[in-house]
Image (spheres, rainbow, N blue to C red):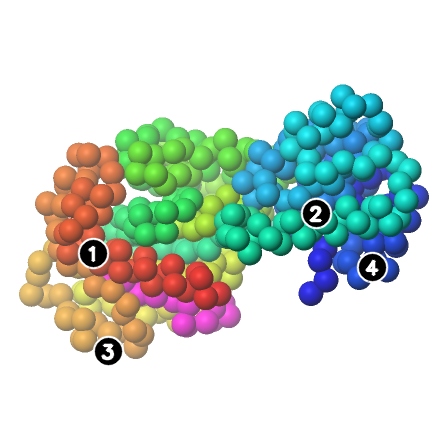
Amino acid sequence: MAEKILIVDDDVDTLRLVGLMLHKQGYQISAASNGSQGLKKALDERPDLILLDVMMPDMDGYEVTRRLRKNPATASLPILMFTAKTQLDDKVTGFEVGADDYLTKPTHPSELQAHVKALLSRTALKNNGHTTTALHDQHGYMIGVLSARGGLGVSSVASNLAASLHARSRSDVILAELTPGKGSLGMDLGTPNQKGLTEILRGSVAEVTLEKVMASLVKHNSGIKLFLASENPRDVNLISQIQNYETLMTHLETLARFIVLDIGVGLPDFVQKLLPKFNECIVVVEGAPSSIQHTKYLIDEIASLNINRKNISVVLNNRQRSDALMSLNQAQEKLGHLISATLTPAPELFLQATRMQTPAVLTEPSNMISLQFLKIADTIVEREKAR
């Protein structure tokens, strides 16, 4: 596939002439006429190289470069500054803010082509040497966790899965709670009274910026980053803000290799809209007959949204010891869907985790429950690598 070059310049003639010249060299060209548009295209399209003018009215090239370098999703994109500024101080400033190369206008086409080719070659060598991360090359792997009804341990499964993915992959993991007014992870993990999701959903879609989402992330001592819902019951009506949710997902998937989403119970409208964006979803079920039946209905409804059943994993979460609960084989047969993991009761472990305000898998890594979560994480990491 042809390498893509994003040209950001407020001069229409430059956009046209340079774009045409590079297009003739076999490159795929994208254009932006100002800094703000350039930032958005860089995030949405992930070009192989950005050819960036310095002198633009709304946001100069230096500021564009600063913002690109600040965002983990665009931090490694190669930037060639292309400008009429010829002073040495201007070049120094360009390199200080993060430009990879610098050319002054006017320049001969062959010189521009040589710089573009050299910069793309250096970037390819870095990528082949694995000095950039998967995060910069592709969108994060998104996993939605939900259940057919409440009280089945969705938040617990989501938080322990996130911690396990971080432990196994040693990469950025975001645990995001998408249930306004029903937040519990903040209290469980020692970061209560968070309003990140509330602020995202209350504003207009235009206000759901990458910077705002990044500012809402809370670093937990487990190593994962948290994006949390409020505990205020009044906020539950915010689930109607579907466009805000969609924009939030667009930003979250650029900020980590894995994004684990606690999406709660059932299939409200926002969940139906988001599910096709997930790489996979995990359905939590209990071994009680009624829970199995409700979950069967849920899986059928998820599949009706054009979600491949292969991308639906089921976790049997038996949190209490009871003769009334079905065995794995019984539950699987009644459900009509493969159960990928079974979590055995461990109330003492989870009580200890609550007291320590950390995911249970980190309190006793050798516990059977912890090993089960690590096994689930290993499977997800393998699927992520193979996608």
Q: Closer to the camera, 248 or 11?
A: 11
Asked whether the beta carbons under mark 2 and mark 1 sit within 8 Å of each other, the answer is: no
Q: Nearer the viewer, mark 1 or mark 4?
A: 4
Please give the name of the residue rendered at 30% of the width and 77% of the height, measured from the top-left corner. Answer: 336
Residue 87 coordinates in the image, percent (x, y): 82, 23
Asked whether the beta carbons under mark 1 and mark 4 sit within 8 Å of each other, the answer is: no
- Examine the structure image and report whether residue 22 is included in the region drawn in magenta: no
Q: Closer to the camera, 240 or 177?
A: 177
Q: Closer to the camera, 184 or 225?
A: 225
**Could you tell me which quadrant the N terminus lies in?**
bottom right
Q: Which residue corresponds to mark 3?
A: 333
**How far is disc 2 from disc 1 in space, using C-alphas?**
45 Å
Please give the name of the residue rendered at 20% of the width and 56% of the height, measured from the top-left corner. Answer: 371
Q: Point out which mark residue 25 bears.
A: 4
Q: Closer to the camera, 51 or 113?
A: 113
Q: Which residues fall within the magenta stretch?
A: 304-317
Residue 387 coordinates in the image, percent (x, y): 48, 65
Q: Nearer the viewer, mark 4 or mark 2?
A: 2
Q: Point out which mark residue 139 bears.
A: none
Is the residue marked by circle 1 packed among few (<14), some (14-19), or many (20+) residues within 10 Å?
some
**How far is disc 1 from disc 3 in space, using C-alphas?**
25 Å
In terms of sequence position, does the residue under pointer 4 or pointer 2 come before the other? 4
The answer to whether residue 167 shows anywhere in this view is yes
In terms of sequence position, does the residue under pointer 1 or pointer 4 come before the other? 4
Residue 227 coordinates in the image, percent (x, y): 42, 39
Is the residue marked by circle 4 packed among few (<14), some (14-19), or many (20+) residues within 10 Å?
few
Q: Which residue corresponds to mark 2?
A: 119
Q: Which residue corresponds to mark 1?
A: 371
Amino acid tagged 3: Glu
Quarter holding residue 342: bottom left
